[in-house]
Image (cartoon, rainbow, N blue to C red):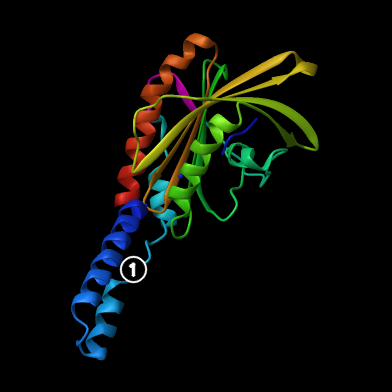
């Protein structure tokens, strides 16, 4: 399995505040000049948040020097594969296990291995227009309690998945964590992946960590902070 999130919150608050101010001003100043009102209306409309540039998305990607000792960079080929949940309300969770995100401009991605490949780390950054980045994070957060168990189709085959909320440190303007568990009976294999989805401006970062064993999950908080800090710095540059 390969796992490949706005200043928009501030924009939304600004829109609400401006709408409220405009409504109050309109009722108190009925005799104002139409041209002035037109100017005020234009001024009230906030500029659209700019998408992250390719350079910003690349700058937010971790390098070996950013990680604890023992990690090695690996290639992260993008296949464009997209997973599909059998239940529509669970599609946001299937999306975070896809190589391509609907409506997003995909940016830099990188994978790392530790212990000869026993533990894996994958980071992807992408940008979404308008409020898409914040909406994406929210959709994942909403899907987690609704999809404790669901099925996802990969390569034409249904795969059972379990999802559980994963407490993580805050990253960016909004973020959420989820632990996804997939069991593959044919291979007698269980894959647990800790995933952080974080949003800053119009950018989204997806970080997935597959540890060697249960004890390895403890490393995720540190890895998530390193990745989140670098992503936010790049998105704000």
Residue 63 vs 117, above or below: the answer is below
Q: Position of residue 155 (x, y in %)?
A: 77, 37
Q: Which residues are magenta?
A: 65-72
Residue 83 makes an appearance in the image: no
Residue 77, image quadrant: top right
Q: Is residue 6 left or right of residue 192?
A: left
Residue 84, image quadrant: top right
Q: Secondary structure at mark 1?
A: loop
| 66 part of magenta stretch | yes
Q: Position of residue 113 (x, y in %)?
A: 52, 24
| Few, some or many residues within 10 Å of mark 1 (<14, 14–19, 20+) | few
Q: Position of residue 125 (x, y in %)?
A: 47, 45
Residue 54 makes an appearance in the image: yes
Residue 227 vs 41, above or below: the answer is above
Viewer-nearest residue: 117 or 218: 218
Residue at image mark 1: 47
> Residue at (66%, 16%) from the top-left corner?
190
> Residue at (26%, 75%) from the top-left corner?
43
Q: Position of residue 195 (x, y in %)?
A: 50, 30
> Residue at (70%, 15%) from the top-left corner?
189
| 151 part of magenta stretch | no
Q: Is residue 46 left or right of residue 109?
A: left
**Number of callouts in the render?**
1
Residue 51, image quadrant: bottom left
Please identify the quadrant where the N terminus is shown: top right
Residue 18 vs 82, above or below: the answer is below
Q: Is residue 156 left or right of residue 19?
A: right
Viewer-nearest residue: 140 or 127: 140
> Residue at (77%, 16%) from the top-left corner?
185
Viewer-nearest residue: 134 or 53: 134
């Amino acid at each position: 399995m390969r796992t490949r999130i706005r200043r928009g919150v501030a924009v939304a608050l600004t829109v609400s505040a401006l709408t409220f101010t405009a409504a109050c001003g309109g009722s108190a100043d009925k005799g104002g000049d139409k041209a002035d009102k037109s100017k005020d209306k234009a001024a009230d409309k906030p500029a659209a948040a700019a998408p992250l540039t390719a350079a910003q998305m690349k700058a937010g990607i971790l390098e070996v020097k950013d990680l604890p000792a023992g990690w090695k960079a690996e290639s992260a080929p993008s296949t464009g594969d997209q997973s599909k949940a059998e239940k529509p309300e669970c599609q946001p969770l299937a999306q975070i296990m896809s190589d391509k995100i609907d409506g997003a401009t995909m940016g830099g991605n990188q994978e790392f291995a530790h212990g000869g490949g026993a533990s894996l780390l994958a980071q992807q950054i992408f940008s979404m227009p308008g409020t898409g980045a914040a909406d994406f994070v929210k959709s994942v957060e909403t899907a987690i309690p609704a999809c404790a168990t669901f099925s996802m189709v990969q390569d034409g085959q249904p795969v059972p998945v379990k999802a559980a909320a994963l407490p993580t440190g805050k990253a960016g303007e909004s973020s959420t964590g989820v632990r996804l568990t997939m069991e593959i009976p044919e291979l007698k294999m269980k894959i647990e992946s800790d995933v952080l989805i974080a949003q800053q401006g119009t950018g989204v970062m997806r970080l997935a960590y597959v540890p060697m064993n249960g004890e390895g999950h403890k490393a995720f908080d540190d890895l998530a902070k390193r990745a989140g800090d670098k992503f936010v710095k790049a998105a704000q540059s």
